[in-house]
Amino acid sequence: MKVIIAKDYDAMCRRAADLLFAQVVLKPESVLGLATGSTPCGIYAQLVEKYNAGDIDFSRVKTVNLDEYVGLPVENDQSYRYYMNSNLFSKVNVLSDNTNLPNGLARDVSAECERYDGLIKELGGVDMQLLGIGLNGHIGFNEPNDVFDKGTHCVNLTKSTIEANARFFKSIDEVPKQAITMGIKTIMMAKKIILAINGEKKKEIAKAAIYGPVTPKVPASILQMHPDVTVVLDEAAAELIK
Ligand code: PGA
């Protein structure tokens, strides 16, 4: 793992955006694996800035997102499709048909999971996958477990994740209880991975993920086994590993 410590959130976002930028410049038809949540907002803002400056072209880029809530229509402003459209897709020249998220409204959820893994394979795999990390060590919605989950699957969100995500909803009761997420195997098959971590409250989990034992109790710890991971942290999140 390569570990980069940036001064603050903005600097962390610049470093992570630079890696995505370089990926697209070097391979304009890249398949980018994208993430949602508060961490990547500033990373997408940096990419939009580069796009507005004429430095990056998304016209051949394809995207696959990590996850989507089950049961939220795409018009719901908390759906991850809505998040991606408003933070990135509507602001750059990526073709809408080239952007992919799991369909959280699919009637047959297991068929949808199979379709999603098939789609990633058809695209030739993910060139660069951006990840955030949950307070409990989840990546995508792969929650702590007794075993590492493999392909794309439907998960029951843990109490800790529901509570963490309640900040985006009017009340905790509105937070969906399930999501479709790429599995650990799906994520680990990406050629390159960027893990972005910011904020004091992530300092313990950052240390556990980067230097702790590799265990499904801390799903992000599996990234220690991947050959090309860059972890970008701000100083607050890096406090215990400096
Ligand atoms: P956050 O979520 O960026 O909103 O903290 C990260 C995650 O849960 O993966």
Image (cartoon, grey):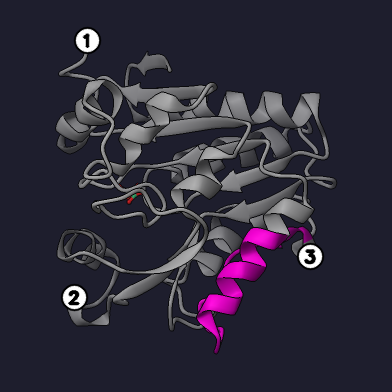
On the image, the x and y values in percent for residue 193 come to 53, 32
Question: How far, Cα to Cα, is label 3 from label 2?
Answer: 33 Å
Towards the viewer: 59 or 207: 207
| Mark 2 CB within 8 Å of ligand 1 | no
Quadrant assignment, res 11:
top left
Question: Which amino acid type corresponds to the residue marked 2 in the rendered image?
Answer: Ile
Q: Which residue is mark 1?
A: 242
- The residue tagged with tag 1: helix, strand or loop? loop
Q: Are marks 3 and 1 in contact (CB under 8 Å)?
A: no
Question: How far, Cα to Cα, is label 2 from label 1?
Answer: 36 Å
Q: Which residue is mark 2?
A: 172
Q: Which residues are magenta?
A: 98-118
Quadrant in which the N terminus is drawn:
top left
Towards the viewer: 204 or 13: 204
Q: Which residue is mark 3?
A: 97
Q: Residues within 10 Å of mark 2 (few under 14, many from 20)?
A: some
Above or below 48: residue 197: above
Residue depicted at x 40% and y 70%: 179
On the image, the x and y values in percent for residue 221 come to 31, 33
Q: Are marks 2 and 1 in contact (CB under 8 Å)?
A: no
Quadrant assignment, res 40:
top left
Q: Are marks 3 and 2 in contact (CB under 8 Å)?
A: no
On the image, the x and y values in percent for residue 178 come to 34, 74
Question: Which amino acid type corresponds to the residue marked 1 in the rendered image?
Answer: Lys
Question: Which amino acid type corresponds to the residue marked 3 in the rendered image?
Answer: Asp
Residue depicted at x 51% and y 83%: 73
- The residue tagged with tag 2: helix, strand or loop? helix
The verdict on residue 27 being magenta is: no
